Image (spheres, grey):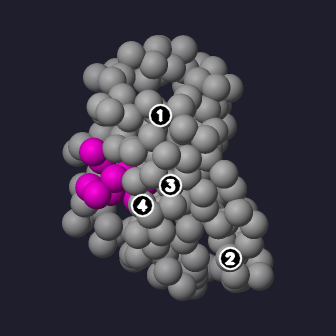
Amino acid sequence: MSISNLNALVADIAAAQVPPPMTTRIIGIDGCGGAGKSTLAERLATPLDARIIHTDDFASWDNPLNWHDRLLAQVLIPLSRNIAGRYQRYDWHTRRLAEWYDLPVGGTVIVEGVSATRAVFRPMLSYTIFVETPQPTRLARGLERDGAQALELWRAWQKAEDDYLATERPADFANIVLDGTRTLP
């Protein structure tokens, strides 16, 4: 499938079925670090009237991919049962869990971040997007955001991402794969 602009993507997402008996539409935006997932989520949030959950609120440098049980238990499983979700955000600066967030049932939620569409999440997702961006571009974006001192952390993170991509193959299961080097008009 080819999507030519943001309005077409919003319409495609809005037409997607919510898995019964759920009443909350959950959209997954996956891709590697620096791919453009957060930017896309921010652009979609207003036209979809969606709340955004960042997988970065669950992951850490020390635990880049094995945090999914907390997202399942605190957000996805409750919402899939039409029960409000409640999760505690990870603070990357203090390296501790921080404030709590409440998620009411209903409406649209965007879960964006590395491994946001892993296999265990897919039955609860109404629509999935994979943002594909070349590794050098992703690394440059990440270092611009986190500083050159984070280079070794980024290299380790990218190794974990490579393992995730090989194991889970999220692009193969996405409703759509978008080019993270282009901005949808």
Q: Name the kind of residue labelled 1 in the image.
A: Thr
Residue 69 spot, x, y in % from top left:
41, 69
Residue at image coords 71%, 63%: 100
The disc at residue 75 is: 3
Which numbered disc, 3 or 2, marks the residue closer to the eye?
A: 3
User: Label 2, label 1: how many angstroms apart (C-alpha)?
Assistant: 26 Å
Q: Could you tell me which secondary element the residue under label 4 belongs to?
A: helix
Q: Is residue 146 left or right of residue 80?
A: right
SS for callout 3: helix
List the residue tagged with mark 2. 97
Q: Are marks 4 and 3 in contact (CB under 8 Å)?
A: yes
Q: Earlier in the sequence, mark 3 or mark 1?
A: 1
> Magenta residues?
115-123
Q: Is residue 118 magenta?
A: yes
The quarter of the picture where residue 177 lies is: top left
Height in image: 147 above or below 37? below
Residue count near mark 3 (Cα–Cα under 10 Å), binned few <14, some 14–19, many ≥20: many
Query: Can you identify the residue that label 1 sits on?
Result: 24
| Amino acid type at mark 2 | Leu
Quadrant in which residue 169 is drawn: bottom left
Compared to residue 167, the image places residue 169 above or below, namely above
Q: Quadrant of the N terminus?
A: top left
Q: Which mark is residue 72?
A: 4
Identity of the residue drawn at 60% across and 57% down: 86
Q: CA distance from mark 1 to mark 4?
A: 15 Å
Percent of width and height locating residue 182: 53, 34
